[in-house]
Image (cartoon, rainbow, N blue to C red):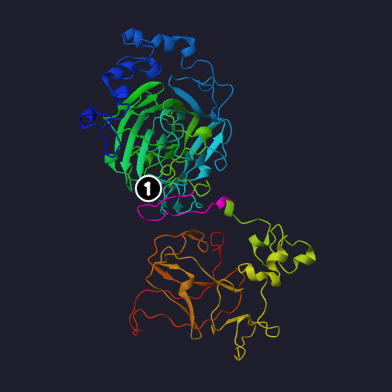
Amino acid sequence: YVPGRDCQCNDKCHQYGDCCSDYEARCTAASQQRHASCESYGCVGYAPGRACQCNDKCHEYGDCCSDYKAICVSPQSQPKAPGAGPSSGGKIFGHPSASIQYPAYPGYTLMLAEEFDGPIDLDADPIWTWSDGGLSEGQARFVKENIKFRDGKMIIELSSGRPSHAQPCSHAEVDVIPDNKTASSGEIRTKHNMFRYGRYEVRMKAPTVQPGAPETDGNFVATMFVFRDGKFKHWREIDVEVLGDSSGRVSTNVITGENVKKFRLDMDRSKKYEAPFNLRGDFHTYAFEWLPDSVTWFLDGKVIREERLGDVPIPELSGKIIMNLWEFDKRALFGGEKIWNDRLPMHSEYDWFRFYKWDGDAQYPCADMGDQCLTEDDKYLSSNNPCDGIPQVGMVFGNAPCTGICLASSMPMNGSCMSYGCIGYVPENTCQCNDKCLHYGDCCSDYSAVCLPQNTSSHRSHKAPLTPFSSGSGIFGHPSASAQYPAHPGFTLMLVEEFDSPIDLDADPIWTWSDGGLVEGKQRFVQESIKFEDGKMIIEMSSTPPLHAQSCSHAEAAMLLNYSGSSGEIRTKHNMFRYGRYEVRMKAPLVQPSNPYVDGNFIATMFVFRDGKFKHW
């Protein structure tokens, strides 16, 4: 009995009057007998619990199905028989090979084949894309660059070091991923929830924990599985996972859940199988057949597990095909206890992948592998990465999902003033955006539109070169015409700020604001905490979290998370100040109002600092 279904398929449904219309045909003892055939089962290895068998040992044991010889022995019916492509002669999607004689399985039609003979463009391919996710319990963040194609194989690399360009918001996880991942890996997946009943096969070589040592155990999870996005409504998953805790360990899972935020153990029906050989030293074929009433797993053609409806919940909703490689966090609760043996990088290698559609499924996949058959529920929060063009439609328990930016389409336009800004001569730039470029003939093509004074009003962040306060004084900034500035022998006054009026920190040619925050500090810097009042600049440190601050800080050139307060940092735009005299008249903060004698903790500053600090601090 499965609550919430329109009809039931169990032996009590007649009593309650809620049997599905095809219950008699599919679920009764008479129907089971009718289905006890190699045409139904397929020509596979020994499968416990079946009324008869369809393998090359069945004659020896006297349990062959009546049609075994006709289906499984005759040349035209062999699983490895000639005749590439689906039995119907239809199109094979993906990147199949014209020279391969694909096996046939009765009741199934080959729909998708990937041979990995050449690279797949994961931004442009109509079926496949990449994930920007990363499991909360894992050490790795998934990035496109760790999915590699070479020598006729797909290779997923688990490498040390967090990916510096990964955005905090993950479309695949529909969540912000903390900036605490210590490794990078890859996850390839189909774009849409459009795969359901059928046979899924992959030929894969599991990683070695240490180079040249396939017997050494450690921690990894190398996978091929079907998973439904977004998991929050209907978590549906069928897994094949090769683990690092033993050289022959395979975990098989069926996971179902309704309206859950995170994985729970009570959702999982997991079993482990120990192969009598090492899975890391060579390629092996992993497969599962998913039908409305059963899931059967295979290793090199041998059945290693079979589950039927009633024993475990069988997923009934479509999902995505996914392959990935990851490592548990330091707790090593799954994937192998001996995580201390891991030596990165690790690699899982995929020789090929195939999907055979069950001929009884009239809905999925969509015709021509498009998205026209998808329901609104299929499209719920189903984006995989910011560049896949799939909108994040839906809410997460009343909250809007986070969104990332497709960096591939938002990178600066090289060779333009819109990219460089209207600044002085820069030797490494391919063209120039300064007031001498017309003389030297090396202006960027958009110099006039972006940098000339009559056109700068709409390009506030790309102002023309600095102009002095007055042609006579040569003092930049906002000096006072009535002030008598002190002179210091050997020095010339160049920049003065009196703070008599607000400075527009988005448009000022010299000054701007920082979006940074010290890693050891509590406050994130925001523009709003820099105030101009009563002829003074006031920097306010408050306990209000910076809710609108983006995780990516340009000033820190890093991701910043988990700040409990806000403050401000004003700075000049460029690394253009060096030897000279720097003066500021400043009143330090009070730790408590009206009590200058109470000590506490703060740092109030004026300093010179070189960006970016990574080369020359």
The reply to whether the magenta stretch includes residue 400 is: yes
Decide whether the magenta segment is chiefly helix, strand or loop: loop
Q: Is residue 538 above or below residue 366?
A: below
Residue at the spot x=34%, y=76% of the render? 600
Residue at the spot x=53%, y=33% of the render? 368
Q: Quadrant of residue 310?
A: top left
Q: Is residue 105 above or below residue 361?
A: above
Relative image position of residue 114 (x, y in whole percent): 52, 30
Q: Is residue 582 left or right of residue 31?
A: right
Residue at the spot x=48%, y=78% of the render? 531
Q: Is residue 463 visible?
A: no
Which residues, given as a range, are shown in magenta? 391-408
Task: Count the marks.
Answer: 1
For mark 1, give the secondary structure. loop
Q: Is residue 499 visible?
A: yes
Residue where numbered disc 1 is placed: 136
Query: Front-most of 452 and 68?
Result: 68
Relative image position of residue 296 (x, y in whole percent): 35, 26
